[in-house]
Image (cartoon, rainbow, N blue to C red):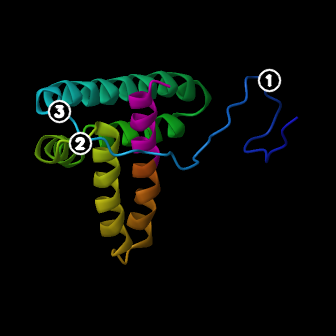
């Protein structure tokens, strides 16, 4: 049995979801030059799958409260960010590395940038980005 903190009045009966934000073990793999475009396609497919999952979650969340679905819109926008996607694809192409490693390196770059920002609100967006990237990585792993 799980215990938690009530966030609203009343009783709710539903499936419980455990959010696991544990660190993923990412191995760097060097790709054959002829496999690079396939790896980019695999990365793009993982992005699209993650977007679809976010939209499905948004539909369920909007039944509870509109404010939760707005949060998921923010996550979807992060997945559509040209800098995140382009930087990762550039790493795959230039360094010939697997998508999981490339997006992790991109995340590390953004994390360093966020850590140097003095605005606490913007620093908090780092956690949102990590959550979204972990979703993409899990889809790359096939989960």
Q: Quick one: which residue is furthest to the right in this view?
A: 1
Q: Residues within 10 Å of mark 3 (few under 14, many from 20)?
A: few
Real-space Cα separation, disc 3 to disc 2, in angstroms: 9 Å
Residue 135: within the magenta? yes
Q: Which mark is residue 78?
A: none
Q: Nearer the viewer, residue 41 or 52?
A: 41
* Principal secondary structure, stretch drawn in magenta: helix
Residue indicated by mark 2? 97
Residue 67: within the magenta? no
Residue indicated by mark 3? 32
- Residue 77 position, x and y percent, is 31, 40
Instruction: Please indicate whether residue 4 sits to the left or right of residue 21 in the image.
Output: right
Q: Quadrant of residue 4?
A: top right
Q: Quadrant of residue 75?
A: top left
Q: Residues within 10 Å of mark 1 (few under 14, many from 20)?
A: few
Pick the quarter of the image with the N terminus: top right
Q: Nearer the viewer, residue 12 or 115?
A: 115
- Residue 68 position, x and y percent, is 53, 38
Q: Quadrant of residue 51?
A: top left
For marks 3 and 2, the one nearer the N-term is 3
Tags 3 and 2 touching, CB below 8 Å: no
Residue indicated by mark 1? 13
Real-space Cα separation, disc 1 to disc 2, in angstroms: 45 Å
Q: Vertical placement of 53 versus 116: above or below?
A: above
């Amino acid at each position: 049995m799980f215990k938690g903190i009530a966030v609203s009045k009343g009783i709710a009966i539903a499936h419980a979801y455990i959010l696991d934000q544990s660190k993923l073990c990412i191995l760097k793999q060097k790709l054959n030059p002829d496999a690079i475009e396939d790896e980019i396609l695999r990365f793009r497919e993982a992005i699209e799958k993650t977007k679809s999952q976010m939209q499905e979650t948004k539909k369920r969340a909007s039944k509870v409260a509109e404010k939760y679905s707005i949060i998921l819109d923010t996550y979807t926008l992060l997945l559509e960010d040209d800098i995140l996607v382009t930087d990762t694809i550039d790493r795959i192409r230039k360094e010939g590395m697997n998508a999981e490693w490339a997006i992790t390196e991109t995340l590390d770059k953004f994390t360093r940038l966020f850590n140097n920002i003095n605005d606490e609100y913007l620093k908090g967006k780092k956690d949102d980005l990590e959550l979204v990237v972990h979703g993409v990585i899990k889809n790359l792993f096939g989960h």
